[in-house]
Image (cartoon, rainbow, N blue to C red):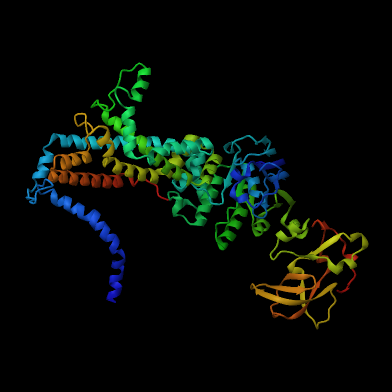
Amino acid sequence: MRKHQITPYIFIAPAILVFSVFYIYPLMYMGYLSFHSWNFISVEKPFVGLDNYIRIFSDPIFYETVWNTLKYAFFTVALIVIIAIPLAIWLNQKGRIFTAAQGAVFSPHIISLVSVSMIWMWIMDVDYGLLNWIVSLFGVKSVGWLTNPNVAMYSLIFVSVWKSLGYYTLIIIAALQSIPKDLYEAAAIDKASKWRVFSKITFPMLTPTIFFISIIALINSIQVFETIDIMTGGGPINSTTTLVYYIYEEGFNNFHLGTASAAGMVLLFILMLLTILYFKVLSNRVHYQ
Amino acid sequence: MAGIKIKNVSKTYQNTNERVPKRIHIFKKKIKENTRNVQVIDKINLDIKDGSFTVLVGPSGCGKSTMLRMIAGLEDITEGEVWVGDKLVNHMSPGDRNISMVFQNYALYPTMTVRQNIEFSLENIKVPKVERDRMVKDVAETVGLMEYLDTKPGKLSGGQRQRVALARAIVKRPDVYIFDEPLSNLDAKLRAEMRTELIQMHEKLKTTFIYVTHDQVEAMSMADEIVLMNRGEIMQIGSPVDIYNDPKNIFVAQFMGTPSMNVMPIGELINRLEPHFQHVSYFGFRPEKGILLGRSILHSYEIEIASKILTREILGAETIYKIENKYGVQNIKTTETHYSLGEEVNLCLSLDSLYYFDHDEQRVYADKTVLEAGIS
């Protein structure tokens, strides 16, 4: 009898072990560190209570960071959803051109983010970048795509949308293809206009997928790091510093592991809050079959 | 209300590897030399009378659904003309043909409620709200869906979904109703019920019904007129009784009826036909026309064939025996249940129950007097 009670736990033990070591433990340890002061080297980790939290919450740059993160996440998700749907509908046609276009749109996804960042850094360079050359053809003065504090964030958002659009488009194409053809035939017989077909059939059938990709895109964009590290280093004047980049700077450049962990806890909290909010607000509008 | 005229209509799928719908894969009738074009409908002429209940029936891949979809406008017409009433509809979009279609999988819009499903087509042609509500209410009462108007199709049973599909078709008041195997997803009991309801619905609406099925029972029980198709061609057109009693060829004879007609090579029976019927190659009879009698009993049927019982299926009201004799294996449908496996019996047939077919499997009409009575 007892044997039977233990057996299932033995089966799940490896997964639990891996999960504990790589997820639960670091999470707990981050929580622990956020109440202590540590610089990576010292043996002592004195308990400082809420000091770390007080420090980040009284740091104006931290608020700017949170704001930047939300701005980045909002625009990235919004643009992806707004562009990916029509793009997917356009690409979801038969023919060689569309197959090729699907491949082209998807290809940025398989390129390493580091390479993507390097390429776009070159394209967006103020002095010898491709983008400014194109802009100059229209008589516009050089734009500091990555050096102007008012523009840099939007440049990063653009790169991130460019990079991940193909992936999300592909998911929507898959969803489009799973909509039964006879619904469209029935709509044709019912004399529905193209707009009515889209707004009453296609779009409602896509809502579960749109919900899925927007939540995945949201979580991914809040955790953005590589593009910022490579392309702007959080600058100019912290205009592109997001939460994850702030944590990295605090922890690994300034060696304030305590404040970095506190910021990590805040990030965790924000993600949790957004996810819950998302499910509460949107799940009512999503149609599951 | 409108009749339908189909003149010389053909359908060819070009570049077969890519475009032929899966359901047609069985039927590769004419693959033209050097092209990969497949012709699935071959110069069909058909006149569907206004207000009739016409059933297109045939085995899978015979082109019946393609035919239907060409009438509906869901499939291009390669050649020929389709007329709905006095309108040539070849290049009309499906929405302009004033037809309703009930699909095999119902094709209900899953994100809409029953009410929205029904009024979708009315909204598309901008029927005012008050008018729409009245029409939806009327039709919902007709099919018995009043209490489900605000439910989504996902929550309904198969039979209820079928009713929504019907309601959606009726509310448009079309000239022609088109049904693409609408009952094939229902269980046997519900199917029988819906058959009756469809017949009643046709009685009430008095509009042209075109109904596609591969089920010969559905065709027999519902149709005014049956169009039996095979390999892209019409085999026979006629009332259910005509098709059953007067089949024009072996295909029709064997497609209709369960078990199907027993058709055997004519064998030595040929010697008993008159000389000018020497081209007869096959003879056949319906399973219910065969009479089984014990060997020892004296009787005087025109044909008696010594046979042996192979299997017995008791279906309740009737029993189906599989018997073997020198002409091969045949099915016999009878009310007798007492013959046991392996028992020696006589298969007795009267001459007027026999059908004859020539080498090309076409019917040969032979008068019964050509045969002399006697033990074969």
Q: Residue furthest bottom?
A: B296
Task: Report the side of A275 relative to A260 (left or right).
Answer: right
Task: Report the side of B38 relative to A32 (left or right).
Answer: right
Q: Residue furthest top?
A: A139
Percent position of residue A254, x then y: 14, 39
User: Where is A287 relative to B240, above or below?
Assistant: above
In the foreground, A109 or A176: A109
Give me the residue at 53% from left, 39% from top: A94
The answer to whether residue B127 of the structure is visible from this angle is no
Quarter of the rendering occupied by the N terminus of chain B: top right
Percent position of residue B47, x then y: 72, 44
Quarter residue B48 falls in = top right
Give me the residue at 72% from left, 56% from top: B240
Task: Report the side of A63 relative to B341 (left or right).
Answer: left
User: Where is B107 relative to B196, above or below?
Assistant: above
Quarter residue A107 falls in = top left
Q: Residue furthest right?
A: B275
